[in-house]
Amino acid sequence: MNAPRAAMESSTPPLSPASLALEMRRIRALTRRGKHGEALAALDHLERQHPRFGRACEQRGYCYASLADAPRAIEAFRRAVTLNPALLASWSMLERLHRMTGDLENAAAAAAHVVTLKRLPPPILEAGSLFSEGALTAAESLLRAYQRQAGEHIEAMRLLARIAHRQNALDDAERLLRAVRERAPTYRAARADYARVLIDRQKYRDAGEEIDELLKLDPADRDCLALRAAVDAGLGAHERAIAAYRELLASTPGWTQLHVTLGHSLKAIGRQAEAIERYRSAAAARPDFGDAYWSLANLKTYRFSRSEIECMRAAEAAPATQTIDRYHLCFALGKALEDRCEYPQSWTFYERGNALKHAEGRYDPQLLETLTRKQIEGLGADFFAARAGAGAPDPDPIFIVGLPRSGSTLIEQILASHARVDGTQELYDIPRMALELQGPHPDPIGSRYPGVLAELKPEDFRRLGEQYLADTRAYRRGKPFFIDKMPNNFRHIGLIHLLLPNAKVIDVRREPLACCFSNWKQLYAGGQAFSYSLQDLARYYRTYLDLMRHWNAVLPGSILRVQYEDLLDDLEGSVRRILAFCRLEPEPACLEFYKTVRAIGTASSEQVRKPLFRDGLLGWRHYEPWLGPLRDALGDAVTRYRE
């Protein structure tokens, strides 16, 4: 149990920002005094602690330039600008060194960067450098102070958007980049940033249009081709995405992230062996690549060898490992050791990974609890009765809601096996509509949602319902009904009923200790920020029960409850009940759901391609010695979830 912690204690931790600045001043002084050997040794040590610190590479370049070692100087300055493109001095040195060695083409390219950077106001240039070094708060403060004094600047707006994107404030990032696009439509880098944000917001059609415009300007732009493939994958066109990823990897085999994204598309369509090959290739190319190992673990069926576990342990313990890689490695190690029944050490890694991920986020349970209270107080039976008949009448959508890891993918697979139902994915359209109604920068007191629903007219609800149907058409394959499996839509069942009164809603519920623990040991690609703290998970589950009790009271008969444990006990009876609620005729394929071939993008993709099994139902009991705080925080939820 203490082995991981002991390994971490034996390594040197990264320096604080103040200590880092002090060490850099010392190394620069050594270089000025001609003590190049000491300076390079100090840089070796520093770069082991901070392998992505561009200014250290820049100083290495100066050392080699002083030693008249042009090739090594060029190599160091190139790495510096790769890590931190805002390093004007490195670009200037590259221009000079390339000219000196007769490489006029690269000298001209470096000179172009110098011209671009010199046009920027010094505060924006410094903020860009801070952003590249991960000092997001300092960069944002510098940019906002500059804009207060000098007014809006295109590059400052782009940098603020990139900071917001890095912090997962996607609505802010989209708003800023849309403004940049309107003011500077020829700024290709900003438009590519805009496309990335649209992809992360699951606005795949809009992102595709943006990328297609960029590809008209440069059809060979590899970054844009990768973004186009991501759009195809997001829309479920995985075969097209796979072909594009393979073509890109043929010309750029060292693009490690591309191995992982290719693996995800292969996994989605059930080609597990090929997905494993891609994930392993990424891990082999970069041994501390946490996402590669977590992608293997997230298959839920992969079993790590002892040597792979030791490799992950070493990478996780190394001080130079980036935080994002570290928590991916922690979750992967937690799963690997759980599979080996080494539960104390497994808990240690799950706990560490969750702590790192929780520290990175901004989840505020009060926001959800306050919004829930407002919905319970403001959206009663009379409210819905007064708006009966509003919304789009189409019965097409089937919403599957609940907590993640509650069995919703299994229900989706059962329904998607029916000849009249399209399985899609977790669609972000309803949460996005709620966010837009809520207004920018929501807070627990000042949010306009759900109160703003009282201001909308019947035609507004119909328009929004039709917009939802139009926006989700890209995910459908022509069948009469389709599934929207975004679990967090339980927060917005009132909105769904107003927009789409004939839609079906299925609430999938799982025993709270099992459900919460399953979420706690899951590292999500995005969202679900509540899942990285046992206390937050318990509050979220209790809030879910409170809100579902309200929806069932004010919208009687509109929601079908499916208890995951009951489904395992009586598959045939449960499937009959689900199909009857959805007004679908029974079909044998729904009972043999594991034979249905379709793209599945969630963590349960491999599990629902097999017949039902109960092995994981009580897996949380292996961790019972550590789950007392979760049980206490859940309180009466451990019994009332069945009410």
Image (cartoon, rainbow, N blue to C red):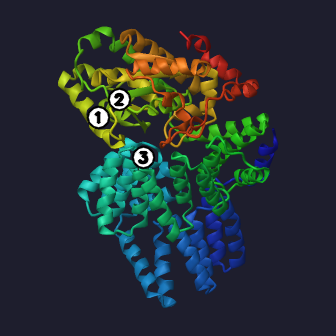
Amino acid carrying label 1: it is Leu
Q: Position of residue 244 (x, y in %)?
A: 44, 61
Disc 3: which residue: 236
Q: Quadrant of residue 428?
A: top left
Disc 2: which residue: 397
- Is any atom of residue 364 visible in this view? no
Q: Position of residue 545 (x, y in %)?
A: 50, 16
Q: CA distance from mark 2 to mark 3?
A: 18 Å
* Left or right: 598 as drawn, with respect to 44: left
Q: Position of residue 279 (x, y in %)?
A: 61, 54
126 or 115: nearer the eye? Answer: 115
Q: CA distance from mark 1 to mark 3?
A: 17 Å
Amino acid carrying label 2: it is Pro
Q: Secondary structure at mark 2?
A: strand
268 or 419: nearer the eye? Answer: 419
Q: 10 Å neighbourhood of mark 3: few (<14), some, or many (≥20)? A: many
Q: Would you say the residues marked 2 and 1 are in contact, meaning their CB atoms lie under 8 Å apart?
A: yes
Amino acid carrying label 3: it is Gly
Q: CA distance from mark 2 to mark 1?
A: 8 Å
Q: Secondary structure at mark 3?
A: loop
Q: Could you tell which of marks 2 and 3 lies nearer the N-terminus?
A: 3
Q: 10 Å neighbourhood of mark 2: few (<14), some, or many (≥20)? A: many
Q: 10 Å neighbourhood of mark 1: few (<14), some, or many (≥20)? A: some
Disc 1: which residue: 469
Q: Could you tell which of marks 2 and 1 lies nearer the N-terminus?
A: 2
Residue 584 tag number: none
